[in-house]
Image (cartoon, rainbow, N blue to C red):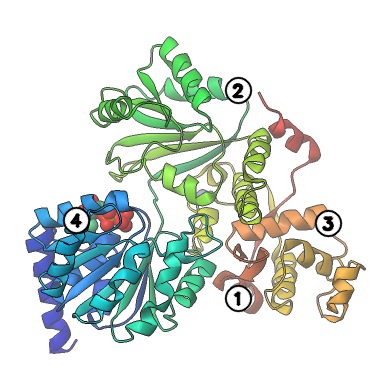
Amino acid sequence: MNTSTTTQQTDIKSLLKTHFGYDDFLANQEEIINNVLDQHDTIAIMPTGGGKSLCFQLPALAMQGTAIVLSPLIALMKDQVDSLKANGIAASFYNSSQHYEEQQEVLRNLQDETLKLLYVAPESLPQLIFILKSVKISLFAVDEAHCISSWGHDFRPAYMQLKSLKEQFPDVPLIALTATADRPTREDIAAQLAIPNAETFIASFDRPNLYLDVRPGQNRNRQILSFLAKRGNQSGIIYCLSRKSTEKLADTLKSKGYKAEAYHAGLSSEERSEIQENFVNDRTPIIVATIAFGMGIDKSNVRWVIHYNMPKNIEGYYQEIGRSGRDGLASHTILFYSFADVIMLRKFAEGTETEAYQLAKLERMQQYAEALSCRRKALLGYFGEHITEDCGNCDICKTPPKYFDGTLIAQKVCSAVARLQEQEALGMVLDVLRGAQNAQVYDKGYQHIKTFGAAKDISWRDLQQYVIQLLNQGILQIYFHENGRLLLTPLAKKVLFENKKVRLANVLQETEIVKTDKAE
Ligand code: ADP
Ligand code: ZN
C-alpha cells in the first residue's frame, strides 16, 4: 500500500466516524468509495439496505466541488437532504416541486460552490447543465440506475436525460447504484450511461439467516394457523395480492385471537401510519398487507414473512422476504405457490406496454417456486451471484428430491447455448437439442451446428424441465431485456471445461403437478 492510499483510508475512516457516526464500513463500501476517490467510473450493486447512499455521500465530502445526485423519487429527496443536513453536511435538492424562489436560491448556492451535495430530479437536469458547466463538480451519482433500462420494470423516461452526462462531463467520475444485479442489467446500465470501463462492485445478496420455504398453496389458511400456533407473539408480515384478501385474512386471524391488522393503499394515510407505528412498536405483531407495506419501515425483529400469493417477480419476492431478520437472527419465510395465482398475474401483465418482459419475469418466479434444487442457489443465481454449495437452510436442502447424475445433459445444453452464441431463448435451444425439423431452425441454419439433435432421446417436456433446473442452479441465466435468450454463467464454463458434476432431479409426474395446481 502506498502512502497516498494510506492517507486516503485514514481520511475516509475519520469522515465515516465524524459525519455518519459509524466505526466500520459495510461490505464493499470502502472499495467503492476508494474507486470513486480515484476518479474512476463505478457501478455499485447492493441489496436494499446495503448502504448505497454512503458510497457517494462520503466521497462527496472528501472531494472538492459539488456532487450531483440524480434520484428518481422527488418525494424522498427532501428526507435524504434533511438527514444529511442533520449530520452537518451542506446539501440541497432541485426539482419541480419547488417554487421559483426556492430554485433560485439553490442555484445561487450551487454557483457559490457552498454545497457538497445537490440532489436533482433527472427531468430537471437539462435546466441545470449550463450552470453545472461553470462550477466544480466532484462526481455524478445515478441512484436507482436500473431506471435507465428501457425494458426494466421501473423504467423512467426522464433517465434518458442522463445518457449524455459522460459525454458532457468526461472528466467527472460517475457512480451508478442499483439493487438490480443481473448481468444483462449491469451491462445495459454501463452501455446507456456510456461508462464502458466502469469497475463493477457487487455486494452479496445472501441473507443466510432467512429460511426459504415454498409450499403448495392448498389450505393456506390452515397452514398459516398451524405455523402461527408455534410462533407466540413474534412479528410477521403476510403479503396478499388484493386488498380484499388482506381484510378477509386479518379478520380470520383476529377471530382466532391473534392481534393482526390489514394494511393496503385503500386506507387513509392516518390509518396507515397508525398501523405501521403499532407494528414497529410491537403492539400489533401481525400485518396482513398488499405490497404497499414495508417500504421505508425500519424494524429489525420481523421473524417471518409469508407470501399468501405468489409475487410477480423475483425482485419483489427478494425485497419482501428481506424485511424479515434484519437483526441477523433466524427467520422463516414461506411462499405459497398456486397455479391459480400464476394465471391471475398473467392477466395483470397482459396488454401492458412491457407485457413480454413482465411475463418472462413471472415465468422465472414460477420456475423458482418449482425449483428442485437449493432455493438459495436459485435466488442468488438470479441476482448474478453463483454459490457452489447448497445452503442447508431451505425446504429443498431439508427434504431433497431424488437426484441422478445429469452432467452429460448439462454439458449438452451448455454447449448448445454456446454454439447458438447465447442468442436464442429456451424454445429454440430445446428445438436444436432435440433436432427439430422446423422452419425456424432451418431458416437460421441451425441444423448444421454440432449439438443439433444431441438430446433427441429426451422428451421435449423433460428436457425443458432440465433446462429450468439449470437456470435454478445458476448455470444458465435469462437475458430479459431481449427475447429472453439464454446466457451462460461462470458455472456453465465449469460444466463445459472442468467437468463439474451436475445433479438433476427426475421431472415431476403429471399427477403431482395437477395436485399442486388445484386452487383451494
Ligand atoms: P440502500 O440505499 O442501499 O438501501 P441506505 O444507503 O439507505 O441503503 O443504508 C441503509 C442503512 O444502513 C441506513 O440506515 C444507513 O444509515 C445504514 N448504514 C450505511 N452505512 C453504514 C455503515 N458503514 N455502518 C452502519 N450502518 C450503515
Ligand atoms: Zn438450500
Circle 4 SS class: helix
Circle 3 SS class: helix
Left or right: 423 as drawn, with respect to 68: right
User: Is the Cβ of the residue at disc 1 closer than 8 Å to that at disc 4?
Assistant: no
Q: Name the residue under label 1.
A: 493
Left or right: 282 as drawn, with respect to 161: left
Q: What residue type is labelled 3?
A: Trp
Q: Name the residue under label 4.
A: 81
Q: Position of residue 501 (x, y in %)?
A: 63, 66
Q: Name the residue under label 3.
A: 460
Q: Identify the residue at horizontal 48%, vertical 55% (top origin).
A: 154
User: Is the Cβ of the residue at disc 2 closer than 8 Å to that at disc 1?
Assistant: no
Q: Quadrant of the N terminus?
A: bottom left
First in residue order: circle 4 vs circle 3: 4
Q: Name the residue under label 2.
A: 219
Circle 2 SS class: loop
Ligand 1 location (quadrant): bottom left
Q: Identify the residue at horizontal 26%, vertical 61% (top origin).
A: 53
First in residue order: circle 2 vs circle 1: 2
First in residue order: circle 1 vs circle 4: 4
